[in-house]
Image: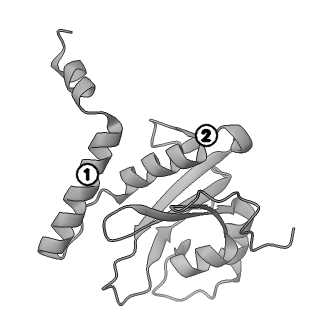
Amino acid sequence: MNNPAEANMDLYSIDKLMHETRQLAAKYRKTTGSTLPVTGEISRFDVAKALDLQLMDDMTLGYDAIGRGERKGLRMLIKGRVIFEDSRSSPRIGQIKSDGRWDRVVMVIFDDDYLPVEMHEATSEDIEAALNTKTESANKKRGAMSVAQFKIIGRLVWTSEDGLSPEIWDNHNN
């Protein structure tokens, strides 16, 4: 092993690096009151691991992963939000472009320590319907959605306690 990068990867697995990133982000927030922009990468890692997804390296595709297993072939967009206990605002998941490049969105909710608490999944049809019925206002971006709204239209597909089966917590009468 002549390549130092290869030697380092033997010493630090991705799991260990993610653990250290969570610790650093949590300590930084507690110390400064500001957040580090790491939630996106942690979200991608956690959702791919929990829901058996293959992450995409090309960030220009318009989706983050391809499903395997029960989600085989589905193009998945991954969003994540840390819900801080001292937050007074209504958290938003940001803009979701309904451009047809993804099939489902998974939103992962993290605690103050950047540990995943739950994951919710919604189809492109659910998202589009919610965005079309939402009242438009000058101060809200098209495609922006609150965490609470996403939870209502989506279904709980994973929790930190037991990884829930998708059929258990379905908000829809299919």
Q: Quadrant of the C terminus?
A: bottom right
Name which residue lies at 70% across and 82% down: 133
Above or below, comparing residue 121 to residue 61 in the picture: below
Q: Nearer the viewer, residue 52 or 96?
A: 52
Residue 83 in sight in this render: yes
Residue 99 in sight in this render: no
Name which residue lies at 28% across and 60% down: 37
Question: What's under tag 1, amino acid-wise?
Answer: Thr
Where, by quadrant of the figure, is residue 67 drawn?
A: top right
Q: Residue furthest left?
A: 31
The numbered dot on residue 21 is: 1
Q: Residue furthest right?
A: 174
Q: How far apart are labels 2 and 1 at the CA level?
A: 24 Å
Q: Residue furthest front?
A: 161
The numbered dot on residue 66 is: 2
At which x and y percent is residue 3?
19, 14
Left or right position of 97 against 86: right
Left or right position of 154 against 146: right
Name which residue lies at 44% across and 86% down: 90
Q: Which tag is nearer the camera, tag 2 or tag 1?
A: 1
Q: Nearer the viewer, residue 99 or 93?
A: 93
Q: Residues within 10 Å of mark 2 (few under 14, many from 20)?
A: many
The numbered dot on residue 98 is: none
At which x and y percent is residue 172?
79, 72
At which x and y percent is residue 42?
38, 52
Question: What's under tag 2, amino acid-wise?
Answer: Ile
Where, by quadrant of the figure, is residue 159 drawn?
A: bottom right
